[in-house]
Image: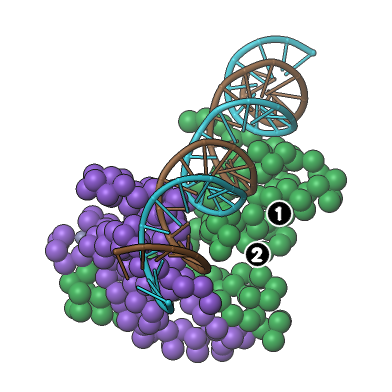
Chain colours: A purple, B green, C cyan, D brown
Amino acid sequence: MRAAYATRPREQVSAVLRREKRYLSAAEIHAILRKSRANVSLSTVYRTLDLLAGKGEASARVDERGEATFVVCDQSHHHHAVCNTCGKVEDVSCEAIESVANALRSHHGFKLADHEMEFFGTCGACR
Amino acid sequence: MRAAYATRPREQVSAVLRREKRYLSAAEIHAILRKSRANVSLSTVYRTLDLLAGKGEASARVDERGEATFVVCDQSHHHHAVCNTCGKVEDVSCEAIESVANALRSHHGFKLADHEMEFFGTCGACR
DNA sequence: ATGATTTTGCAAACCATTCGCAAATTAGGG
DNA sequence: CCCTAATTTGCGAATGGTTTGCAAAATCAT
Ligand SMILES: [Mn+2]
Ligand SMILES: [Mn+2]
Ligand SMILES: [Zn+2]
Ligand SMILES: [Zn+2]
């Protein structure tokens, strides 16, 4: 398999995601890096985001304008609560799904294989 | 307010969605219409889909390749179970969310305002 | 029917994302 | 360190879904 080099641009992109803890587009990350005088090309931002998403270190999401956005994330199955005010993303453990799976199977004959959930509202800090 | 004309192209796009009952992209709808010798321009397909989504008669979703897809849908709040085999979309009523809302509030101080869920699996017919 | 209003089709513009490739960077052995 | 091979970067060009401007066609109210 091909080796993965630990490079400065990759670390800088990753650092932005770890610091911000909210969904960011490639363009936004690029802008943030430029402000801090870290000149990483937009192409490299895109490539690094694909890499992080592939390794499961970041989670992707398409925002309402159709742009791909990413947030730092760990592999385990869970869901996200996104603050409408500050954008912060909090992990939400996945329980409550077993009952839904049962309801789906008995009510529609549907065999549940996977699911996605997202929550929106106001975080504790913003209230 | 501006009037909404009931036109042939719009009815044809809408009819495809009502018949198929699965998520379709503008290009797919355009192709289906061409096969049935209904020559509606791709632009009009896009415009009609925006219209239907705006009126709540269709629900939009961005597929894994980044393309916007639409399915016929009614206004009431509910969720979708999508068959991985035939693509059919079934409406799923929304219960199970109250408990999640409570858990979010007590566990994170998060005030839940909205949520989205999607289910994937195998429908009764395909099993 | 007639005229005002809205919609259509077409091509061009848009814009986020991807790609090709030469130059720059990294890793690792000597 | 030094050298080389492997990988990554940056740039500009290409891609492809979606939007838009505008003249011609269709729809609606009178
Ligand atoms: Mn997460
Ligand atoms: Mn529906
Ligand atoms: Zn907040
Ligand atoms: Zn099916």
**Circle 2 Cα neighbour tier, 10 Å, few/some/many (<14 / 14–19 / ≥20):** many
Please name the residue that numbered disc 2 is placed on: B22
Report which quarter residue C1 is drawn in: top right
Classify residue B73 as left or right of residue B8: left
Please name the residue that numbered disc 1 is placed on: B28
Q: Earlier in the sequence, mark 2 or mark 1?
A: 2
Image coords of residue B117 (percent x, y): 45, 71
**Circle 1 Cα neighbour tier, 10 Å, few/some/many (<14 / 14–19 / ≥20):** some
Q: In the image, what residue occupies the spot 50% across and 89% down? A: A102
Amino acid type assigned to the residue bearing label 1 in the image? Glu
Q: In the image, what residue occupies the spot 46% across and 84% down? A: A100
Mark 2: which secondary structure?
loop
**Does the beta carbon of the residue at mark 1 sit less than 8 Å from ligand 4?**
no
Label 2 vs label 1: CA separation?
A: 11 Å
Name the subunit of mark 2. B
The reply to whether residue B9 is visible in this rendering is yes
Name the subunit of mark 1. B
Image coords of residue A18 (percent x, y): 26, 65
Do the residues marked 2 and 1 share a common chain? yes
Image coords of residue A90 (percent x, y): 27, 70
Nearer-the-camera pick, C21 or A64: C21
Q: Which mark is residue B46?
A: none
Image coords of residue C23 (percent x, y): 45, 46
